[in-house]
Image (spheres, rainbow, N blue to C red):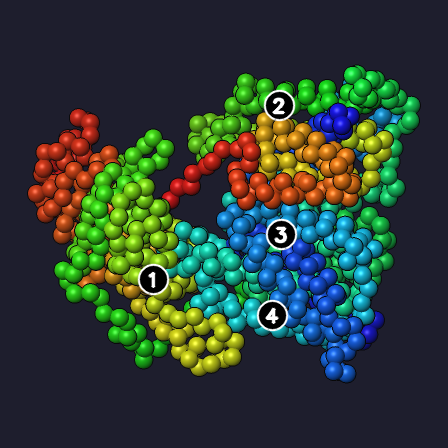
Amino acid sequence: MLQQLANGVFAGSIYALFAIGFTLVFGVLRHLNLAHPAVFTAGAFVGIEVAARTAIPVWILFPVVALFGALAGVLVERIAFRPLRGRDDEHFAGLISSVALGGVVIALLQARYGTEPKSFATDYFPSRLFEFAGIRVTSTQLVTLALALVLMLGLAWLVSATPLGRSMRAVAENPTAAKVLGVNVGRVTAGTYALSSALGTVAGALLALNLGQAGRDLGASIELVGFAVIILGGLGSLWGAMAAGVVLGVAEAMTIHLFDSTWKSMVAFALLFAVLVIRPRGLFGHVKVREV
Amino acid sequence: MLDGYNTLITVAALGAILAYSFHVVLMAGQLSLGQAGFASLAAYTSTLVVPTEPIAGSISPVVVGLPVGALVGAAAAFVVGLPVLRLRGVFLAIATIAFGEMVRVVINNAEWTNGALGMRVEKWVTFDFAWMVVAVLAYLFWRLGPSRSGRAFAAVREDELAAGSMGVDVVRTRMASFIASGAIAGVYGVMFAYFFGRITPATFDFGLTVSGLVTAVLGGYLVFFGPILGSGFLTAVPELQNALGLEAGWIHPFVTGVFLLLVVLFLPGGLSTLFSRLRRAPMRPGPDYAPLDALDPLPDPGTPIAKVRGLAKRYGAVDAVRGVDLEIRSGEVLGVIGPNGAGKTTLVNMLNGLEPPTAGEGQILGVPLGSRPHRFAQAGVSRTFQHSKLFERLTVLDNVLVGTHVVSRSTYLRRLLWLPSARRDERRALALAWAQLERVGLADRAGLRPGALSYGDRRRLEIARALAAHPTLLILDEPAAGMNHVEAAELASLIRGLADDGVTVLFIEHNVKMVLEACTRLVVLDFGEVIAEGEPREVASDPRVVEAYLGTEAAQNDEREEIEHA
């Protein structure tokens, strides 16, 4: 039971990490970036390749992956979203252009890495087993949890206490007003995508480290759970996404424990559906009033 | 010649059917993504209940399966729609995705569906049959476009609040598009089953939803043949690559993705943009129509048409409107003035149902306060907005045609049968719309999009749209904002002309000169309360009004001057 709970927390921290990147872009720019899962998958493959080529230790590997992610994020914004700005169908079109770009990214991954899943070398980060109070955890799980915590707290700090974060909040509140007041909206947009994708790629590499391998469907497998997390947490809410990620991870672990793994994803969607119907702003979101 | 491509072209037909189930919701501006769930329920139901052998010796099971599937899809959409249609945008999208995934997980785990292994059926769908179904769908959408219902869909897509204020029942329209989407998705599910001969829960996964959405948007959801274009394109691209000798593997999805990206980025209306540039400019109907005579007469001057007591609106701790009593009589021009934040717009929003009041009772043209906007519109309340809410992707003429919604009858079903009465009704609506465009002086711009109009023309267009509803009570929210003196003077004379025609006008305005010129009675609001009411010039010189309305010392001199000049 406790063991399941712990497993749920570890899985949930990856969900949360995936989801905060997603929700950050939505919260600041109202874009639903459907290329995020592809970028997440790319992070896993790049992590595996860099680890294999350079044998750098884990704590250097992740910053490298994040740097790649930041670049990818800037490109995603440039290619799939910026050209659509100001168009009547900006929102629908953004969904489709990001799906298309996601498809292109996955195709490029196939070009470079082939169709077979890739793995970390077994001795790259040998997993050791620890036991606390009857709960078994691996060193990979500990790294995952620690990294997720550091990144989430770092992001929260960045958004609340730095000039970039302040500009991001200003753009989220009212892009036009922010522009008039001298905020460089283009740079904030690029920065938001860079951060979001950096988080996404690190999450991807972490999941690959946990699973030992990555396939091209890695992002697709987590995409829908990611939706569930950001809605449960309240779309655009960072703390909400973090909490909801862990809640979902635990709920899934409990379902596997009590029923069967085939029912696992039912929990996420039933919970999601119920929350949307009963409390659309999410568990931690707040209401926005519409103006005439 | 097509022999070798039979299967391929049939697959394209199926893709188009799936895309139509997205098309119908996108037309109404709803991002609904539960189609995989509806298709799955329909396919499994039809597989389970329809006999596998030809019925009565000759009727193929798919012919029975299609109505079953459509019905199952529509019913499921209705049941799901009841709770989820309160949601909008991304939230609706994700709630419907959740529904689709729940269906998949349940079917995957149930025994009567044979779980993940899926079920087998005979293959009954042929090339001809598939395209016949597509042709029927295309016909249904072709006839829908320029009908009253089609315009209602478009109006809801472009702006729900404006659509409701023009008399479109937004809730019903959204539900109708949702149910239609469910039915078409159901048809797709059944077609899929009887074409491929096998269904598994994984068939109807999120990937299917994405591909349907992509096809619909790629083709373009503003024209009826969009889904066919989209599906044709997505089927042809891989095939062309084969023909060009490109290797399969990564190049295929890469090229498809790049093409898709290019279309989305450079053709805003999808592929259909390439075809719709040929559209003719709208023609004025012949002079043999005198539709204005056929409209219901307006109430006699002096008849009370609205009476509200104790009207109040509270936002959290802020009282936007407090204890307002108001009576409106037919034929008057009632001006409402007050400083910014006095509650003027909130007041009129309550009078046409856009916002429910927190307290107060009364009726406007017999419709009780707190009803939904379309009820007020149907009773004869029409309005414009402070920040213009035009239907941006419709032409100027179509904007005004939406205004005729409450004075015309539904024509869609009759249009399907080509009944002459439908044509008559549509021409009558067209004549009504033209009459209003001419009244405000925009007839020469009928074929443009509102985005191409000047600010003053946009305001005039809103007035024409509101007038097309043949209103008893016309509400104008700051109609002269942003107009120059000449335009404002023209507007004032237009308003007086309306009053002469028997239209009751309630208007909010900051241009004091214009208010005093146009209105017969004046109400002054401050901090949500009525502080003065009566004959315009008396009210304007009331010291309480001068103090409240003119605010600070500095502004006082300027505006007092303005009042004195008027």
Inter-mark Cα distance, 1 to 3: 32 Å
Quarter of image, res A144: top right
Q: Quadrant of the N terminus of chain B?
A: bottom right
Which residue is at 57% across, 51% downward?
B31
Q: Quadrant of the C terminus of chain B?
A: top left
Where residue B138 is drawn, which disc sits there?
4
Q: Position of residue B459 (x, y in %)?
A: 32, 52
Crowd band around label 2 with a 10 angstrom C-alpha radius: few (<14), some (14–19), many (20+): many
Q: Which residue is mark 2?
A: A155
Q: Secondary structure at mark 2?
A: helix
Q: Nearer the viewer, mark 2 or mark 3?
A: 3
Cβ atoms at labels 2 and 3 below 8 Å apart:
no
**Amino acid at dot 3:** Leu
**Amino acid at dot 1:** Gln
Inter-mark Cα distance, 4 to 3: 21 Å
> Would residue A157 be seen by someone viewing this image from the given angle?
yes
Q: Which residue is mark 1?
A: B378
Q: Which residue is mark 3?
A: B33
Disc nearer the start of the sequence (1/4): 4
Q: Position of residue B86 (x, y in %)?
A: 50, 49
Q: Position of residue B77 (x, y in %)?
A: 59, 58
Q: Chain of mark 1?
A: B
